[in-house]
Amino acid sequence: MNRKLESLQALRGVAALLVLLFHYRFYLRGDNQSGTTIWDALFGWGIIGVDIFFIISGFIMVYTTQHYMQGCSSAKRFLLNRAIRIIPLYYFGLLVTFLFGGAMSTFHYPEKVQNLLSALTFTVYKTSVTPHYIDDGGMYNIRWTLNYEIYFYLAFALCLMMKHRILALICWGGLMTCVIPALAGFQPTLSVQGYDFQTPTIAFITNPLLIEFLIGVFAGYIYLQLKRRVVSVKLPLISSVIAISLLCYIVFGVYSGSIRALNLESTIVLGLLVLFLTLGEQVLQAYIPRVLKYVGNISFSLYLLHNPIGIAVMKQMGPVGQSAFKGIPTILLATLLSILVAHLTHKYIEVGLTRTLKNKFMPSKQSDQVTRADLAS
């Protein structure tokens, strides 16, 4: 059985809160849209939480499938696991966002209808907005990351049918982000602005942002190899020291601008942090705040629902104007309410409904093999 990695859960909790504050800063800065307010300085970098999510996703996929055999049955099991885990909560979040965002009035505006159809079908439709490829100011805009997640799930499932799945993933990544663009006449790049294909789907599947998942895959693979082959009791201690050093470096890098969100060079550093956090977990787990592990457990619900909940609270409270005395309590209320709702959806949908669906649609043997790490991933 795969042990749930508490350090990753805590890091996932941090990532969810960073993304939440990144979005809520728009309310705090009021009418000042210059991007230079104190709130932009404090929380404008919070989108780096998306990078952390992508890395952890790649890591967890390797970690939770380490005992999967090669073949179609493993690919099917993996995809079914992912679908049951994600789709019910995704559509619940979409329903909440639809109801809070105008409901039936949406159908009076063609661009909103197009956005809704995109959300319903996990499709992209804009080449002018990268790396989202959807309207980043439209309804349920946070779903753009789920599009990448599902794309990577499909690629990973195909690679589970290969004998050397990691090598297959590397080949897939190189083909999509370098070879196909080069054949189309583009200079290969690591920029998440991607390639100027006229078809949104092709632009999406070739975007170098997918390399962030591969960085997580590498971290997961190295973690498993070291845990299997290195038995030294010093490994957790050394790894924990490196992890703390990397964390300090990242904090300073964010402050100085050398560590940036949606930047693949910076993502490598974040990938190293994930690797050494997990290797050093035996030492670090005693110092991980329980609240962060809790937020990590509900992070998927919090990620999907914090925007509609926050917007509803902010509409009731009214414009912040120039007063931080009004803005800060409003954000605290929105955050606490989002966490409460996320707790409930995690309990009844992520855990309760997921368990029911797995018992119904998966063979009992496979269902019994679903680990705590599967539920957390």
Image (cartoon, rainbow, N blue to C red):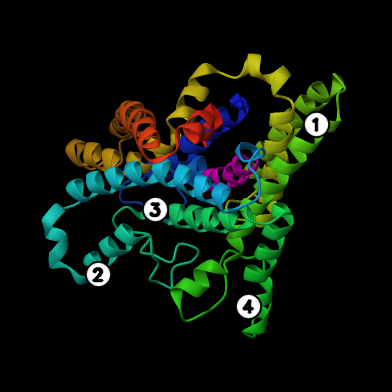
Q: In 3D space, how far apart are the residues under numbered discs 2 and 1 (Cα atoms)?
A: 53 Å
Tell me which label, 2 or 1, sits earlier in the chain: 2
Q: Which tag, 2 or 4, sits closer to the chain's start?
A: 2
Q: Which residue position is annotated with label 2?
A: 111
Q: Quadrant of the N terminus?
A: top right
- Mark in the foreground, 3 or 2: 3
Q: Which residue is mark 3?
A: 143
**2 and 4 marks in contact (CB < 8 Å):** no
* Residue of label 4: 181
Name the N-terminal-most of marks 1 and 4: 4
* Circle on res. 228: 1
- Alpha carbons under labels 3 and 2: distance apart: 17 Å
Range covered by the magenta-colored residues: 49-62
For marks 3 and 1 on the same chain, the one whose residue lies earlier in the sequence? 3
**Element at badge 1?**
helix
In the picture, measured across the screen, residue 160 lies left or right of residue 44, that is: right
Location of residue 225 in the rendering, given as x and y in whole percent from the top left corner: 79, 37
Q: Is residue 336 above or below residue 61?
A: above
Residue at image position (50%, 40%) is: 42
From the viewer's perspective, is residue 125 above or below residue 311? Answer: below
Label 2 sits on a secondary structure element that is helix
Q: Secondary structure at mark 4?
A: helix
Q: Does residue 188 show up?
A: no
**Is label 1 in contact with label 4 (beta carbons under 8 Å)?**
no
Does the image show residue 111? Answer: yes
